[in-house]
Image (cartoon, grey):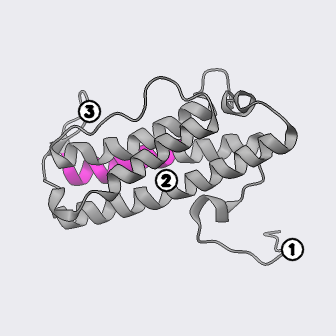
Amino acid sequence: MSSSLLFEATVPVLTRYLGQLLLMLDQAEACVRERQLDDAVLLRQGLTPDMFDLGQQVQIAAGFALRCVAPLLGRTLPALGEGDAQDFAALRRRVAQAQALLSTLGPDDFVQTQAGEAALSMPARDFVLSYAMPNFFFHLCMAYALLRAQGVPLGKPDFDGWHRYAPGFSFV
């Protein structure tokens, strides 16, 4: 897979969906304000006790966007913030920081290497398509699911930014 294709398969996609995550966080915060709740009420919710909570899912998604491209660049990208983000503003800063770092990259920044974490060692193409991008989308989907489970009025258009349905539309 060429460096240009690696770039196209990662940076534009990650940047777009980090933007959608920011929009979902805006809606979540509006919902929290409307209900007169503390941010932590929503951010500390998980689907099960042994699952990462919403705040952690958002942080991991933002971090994975960078973990996806860092090995392909042959360099270490800076960490996003320090510690646990305790409110929507801190989460938005982390997501925006990941977007900003991705915006500085171009196809020429990508190198083909054996990439991966820990015991993983795989070609760059496999790393991107079979490991890194699916992990990013897993955490993005978990954040979406946790927001929906807590009553934040989100739909598929909020997740992907593409879908639009007529008022009253139903799949039934």
Residue 138 lies in the magenta stretch: yes
Count residues near mark 2 (Cα–Cα under 10 Å), then give few for <14, some for 14-19, many for 20+: many
For the point 48% across and 45% down, the residue is: 95
Q: Quadrant of residue 107?
A: bottom left
Image coordinates for residue 35, horizontal then vertical, percent: 86, 40
Instruction: Indicate the amino acid at tag 1.
Output: Gly
Q: Which mark, by number, is residue 18?
A: 2
Residue 4 lies in the magenta stretch: no
Q: Quadrant of the C terminus?
A: bottom right
Circle nearer the N terminus (1, 3) = 3
Q: Which mark, by number, is residue 105?
A: none
- Residue 125 position (above or below residue 149): below
Image coordinates for residue 78, horizontal then vertical, percent: 30, 36
Q: Is residue 131 visible?
A: no
Choose between 12 and 82: the one closer to the eye. 82
Image coordinates for residue 163, horizontal then vertical, percent: 64, 71
Q: Give the extent of the magenta segment.
A: 123-139
Count residues near mark 3 (Cα–Cα under 10 Å), then give few for <14, some for 14-19, many for 20+: few
Residue bearing the label numbered 1: 168
Count of number-bearing discs: 3
Q: Main secondary structure of the magenta part?
A: helix
Instruction: Indicate the amino acid at tag 2.
Output: Leu
Instruction: Indicate the amino acid at tag 3.
Output: Glu
Q: Is residue 17 left or right of residue 104?
A: right
Q: CA distance from mark 2 to mark 3?
A: 22 Å
Residue bearing the label numbered 3: 117
